[in-house]
Each structure stands twice: as C-alpha cells, then as structure tokens.
Image: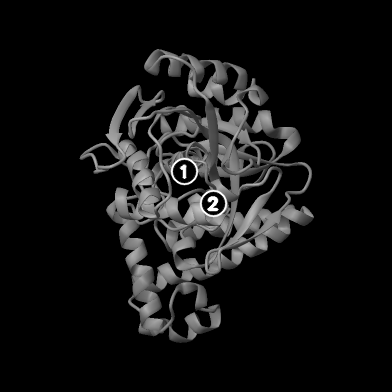
Amino acid sequence: MKSAVDWAVDSQARTEGLGDGFRRTFGGEPELWARAPGRVDLMGSHTDYNLGFVLTLPISRDTWIAARRRDDRTVRVHSMNLDAGDEFRLDAIEPVAGSRWCNYVRGVAATLAGERLALTGCDLAIHSTVPLESGLSSSAALECALATMFAALGGWSLRPERMALLCQKAENEFVGVNCGILDQYSSCLGREACALLLDCRDLSTRSVRLADGIRVVVCNTMSRRRLSGSEYAQRRAECELGAARLGVRALRDVTPQMLAARRPELPEQVARRCDFIVAESARAESLATALTVNDRQIVGRLCAESFAGARDLYEICSPAMVAMMEAMLAAPGAIGARQAGAGFGGSMVALVDAASTDAFCAAVGKAYGKAAGMVPETYPVEAAQGAEVFDKYRCS
C-alpha cells in the first residue's frame, strides 16, 4: 500500500488502494463512497468554546470511506491507516476501553441511533490523509464521513449544521473529548475555494475568498498532541471561570474595554487567558478582511500577535512549535505564520506567496530539521468541499 502522503496527491491510486483494501478485508465490492475534510484554523485558537469567531479552512486532506450494506445489524470496520478492525451490533453499542478510534465510529452510530435515525449494518473500509493527532481534525473528518455514510446507507439526510452538532455530541458524550463545534462545522460545511468565518455563538458562517497569490501551507512539527489532555481542560475551565467572574455567558460577550476595567477582579492567570481569547476572536474577523483585500502587512501582524498570545498568554506552545515558527518566518515567501488547532504540538500554518511555495517548503524542512532534529511534513492545502457522498470515478 502507498503511504498516506502519496495518496494525498494521487487520488487514482487512493481509489484503487481503498477498493483493494475493502475486497481483501470483506470480499466483494463496496457500493458507496463518502468523504469529509480535515481543517486548519487560519485564526481563532480556542475561541470556539468561548462562542467567538474562527476563520477556518476545510482542507484537501480528508477521510474516505468505502461501504457496503449488511442485513444483520452488524457493523464491521477496518482502518487502513492503523491496520486495525472493529465489529459491533447496532442494537448494543458500547465504548471500547483503550481504543479511541473505535469509539469515534461507535459514538457516531450510537448518537445517530439516539436520534431515531434509521441505521443499517454495513462493512466500512476507512482511509485518511489527515495526519493523526496533528491538530488538523482527523477525528472530525472521520466522524463527519461516518455520519454522511450512515445517512446514505439508511436513505435519509440531515442539514450539514445538524450533522455537525450530532458529530460534536458523539465526541463530547461518547468519546469523552469536550471539544467545541469548530472541527465538525468545518468538516460538514466546507466550500471549495473558500475559508469560512464561523460565528460560534449563532453558528452562522460567511465565505471568505483568499486573495490571488496567497497559498496556505501546513507545517507539521511531527510532535503529536492530544485534545483530551489536562492542559486543554484546564484552559477551558479558566475561560469559564473568567466569564463567570465577569458575569457573562461566554468570553465572546466581553469587550476589550470591559476586560481592562475589570481585570483586577480576575486571578492573574485567568486574566491572561481572557486577554488572549478576547483579542483572538477579534483577530479572526480582521484576518478575514485582510486576506480578502490582500493586505499582506496586516496578515503578517495579526498572525504574529496570535502566536505571541498563544505563547505568552494562553501558554499552549511547545519547543517544537517555537522552532517551527522560527523556520516558517525565515523561509522565502512567508507572509504570516501561527499555531493551528489546540496547540501543544501538532501542526502549524503559514500564509505564503504562491510563487514561493516550493522554496518555502524546502527551507522550512531544512531549518526545522536542523533545529528540532525531526523531519517535518510541509504541504500546501486547498479549500475543500464539506462532507459528501461521491462517485469514486470522479477521483480516479
């Protein structure tokens, strides 16, 4: 089997490989195919659970599922990335201790069943080009592809907004990861050629077209991070405490003026977390405008402010992230660079002059490898369509 990196750029090989994997595992041919993208946040770290704004890009790294119906209410699953399988009955869905990926699959099925949506047994072969635990929402891509496939097999449909909320519920309640809505909304509502400015309070979105000549490049530190860790939970609790002390539902409702006036009422660490979130949400809106009008100076400034706040106020940076930031900013064509996802390692993101994309990637790989002693993954990504059933021949 080809590597995930090969399959990320060779859709014909991926189609053939996933089909072969299905036949080897289950025998016969799949009858339906579904996909859902990962995402990278261009601005808005940790603002989603604070009901603020996020500028998100559903990306051309995605999760594919090949499936076939069964008549016995049994779901059999095989992950080609992990070379691992699972089997469960739709009438008795229980978590599996110590197997998070199995629980994502089971959790989506259990959540949909809880909504009294018709589910049918099936065989599922899964492959993803979203790197695992990299901050690019591999879990949401899996969840949303699964929900899309269960809907197709069952003969029903949901609005993308509703599907995103159910996938978030599966992750929150079945898997036990207290994530916000950003990842699932990005994966379900993606649009080709557009970033999305997501208002996490009313869940409305606005399409944002990046100016010609700007490319988005993902730079994976290869330092894995885990969303359910204690550091993430602590940051969320600190934000909730700050909102409660300030008498608001969420930090989205705090203005810079209010925060400055009432800062002495907050514990110092909580105040720093609030400083970051209030400014970060405003930066998401500002970056959407700057990218549309191609104001590269503002883009660079906003990204620099975001990373400084993530490092000094929210404290979600790691040594690998600092080394990657230095490598990105020193590379040819860099316009702006910052953290992506929840931080604590994983991937980062750069906005790059399109003509310098190859030179940028080469320079980052060399500089980061020397500084960190690890070979990073660097690759440009495009804005991608959200979760969908697709014709495999379209991609071959």
Between 45 and 37, the one lying in front of the other is 37
Mark 1 in CB contact with mark 2 (< 8 angstroms):
yes
Can residue 295 be seen from the camera position used here?
Answer: no
Q: How many numbered circles are shown? A: 2
How packed is label 1: few (under 14 Cα within 10 Å), some, or many (20 or more)? many
Q: Position of residue 114 (x, y in %)?
A: 35, 53
Between 92 and 310, the one lying in front of the other is 92
Q: Which mark is residue 158?
A: 2
Q: CA distance from mark 1 to mark 2?
A: 9 Å
Between 138 and 277, the one lying in front of the other is 138
Q: Which residue is mark 1?
A: 147
Q: Is residue 41 above or below residue 271?
A: above
How packed is label 2: few (under 14 Cα within 10 Å), some, or many (20 or more)? few
The residue drawn where x is 36% and y is 29% is: 77
Between 370 and 29, the one lying in front of the other is 29
The residue drawn where x is 69% and y is 43% is: 192
The residue drawn where x is 47% and y is 71% is: 275
Amino acid marked by disc 2 = Leu
Amino acid marked by disc 1 = Ala
Q: Position of residue 6 (x, y in %)?
A: 55, 20
User: Mark 2 falls on what kind of element?
Assistant: loop
Q: Position of residue 276 (x, y in %)?
A: 48, 66
Q: Is residue 82 above or below residue 332?
A: above
State the image quarter where residue 306 is shown.
bottom right
Question: Is 289 situated left or right of 45 in this image?
Answer: right
